[in-house]
């Protein structure tokens, strides 16, 4: 059974690719992409702060704010850039005392179109029965630098 790139359940997700000329360059390119994505996310959404962590085994957290984790997941050369409501114990404890989840969902819905424009290079057309995703490269948006 095949599979596609992982990302947290309920995440706003955009897709891009990681390309390396040589196998030896893959780690360098991954590290460069990771830092580039973090810098771009913090510039676009100033409430985010740099953070290192993981959600499950495949979803790397690069930044977070009071409501959401921003991160990436890679499988092969495909990269899911995502932002999702936080799911860590400190967040759940705080949400239990004062409901944060509705505000988090509202904020994520507000930023979703901009997030997709900033980070999405590919559209997911769907998934085959074996779990593999089918993607199409987007036309360049002339409004983005």
Image: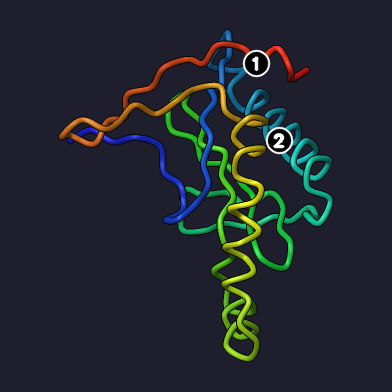
Seen from the viewer's position, the closer of residues 107 and 84 is 107
Residue found at x 40% / y 37%:
5
Which residue is denoted by mark 1 in the rendering? 141
Could you say where residue 118 lies in the image, as x and y percent from the top left?
A: 67, 30
Q: Please say if 35 is above or below 59.
A: above
Residue displayed at 65% across by 23% down: 29
The picture places residue 137, in percent across and down from the top left corner, at: 48, 15
In the rendered structure, are the residues bearing label 1 and label 2 in contact, judged by CB atoms less than 8 Å apart? no
The residue located at (39%, 29%) in the rendering is 124
- Please identify the quarter of the rendering in which residue 121 is found: top right
Task: Tell me the residue at 63%/29% (across/down).
Answer: 117
Of residue 110 and residue 38, the one placed in the foreground of this image is 110
User: If you read the primary sequence from the N terminus, does the residue marked by circle 1 or circle 2 appear first?
Assistant: 2
Report how many numbered discs are placed on residues in the image.
2
> Is 142 positioned to the left or the right of 56 in the image?
right
Packing grade of label 2 (10 A; few <14, some 14-19, many >=20) is many
Q: CA distance from mark 1 to mark 2?
A: 18 Å
Q: Secondary structure at mark 1?
A: loop
Q: Quadrant of residue 37?
A: top right
Does 18 sit above or below residue 64? Answer: above
Which residue is nearer to you in this view: 43 or 22?
43
SS under mark 2 = helix
Q: Which residue is mark 2?
A: 37
Q: Quadrant of the image for the N terminus?
A: top left
Numbered tag placed on residue 72 in the rendering = none
């Amino acid at each position: 059974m095949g599979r596609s790139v992982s990302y947290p359940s309920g995440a706003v997700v955009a897709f891009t690719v990681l390309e390396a000329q040589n196998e030896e360059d893959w780690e360098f390119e991954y590290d460069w992409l990771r830092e580039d994505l973090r810098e771009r996310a913090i510039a676009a959404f100033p409430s985010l702060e740099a953070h290192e962590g993981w959600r499950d085994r495949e979803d790397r957290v690069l930044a977070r704010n009071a409501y959401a984790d921003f991160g990436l997941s890679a499988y092969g050369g495909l990269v899911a850039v995502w932002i999702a409501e936080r799911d860590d114990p400190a967040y759940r404890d705080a949400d239990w005392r004062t409901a944060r989840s509705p505000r988090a969902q509202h904020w994520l819905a507000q930023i979703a179109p901009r997030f997709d424009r900033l980070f999405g290079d590919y559209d997911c057309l769907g998934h085959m029965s074996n779990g593999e995703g089918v993607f199409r490269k987007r036309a360049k948006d002339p409004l983005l630098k």
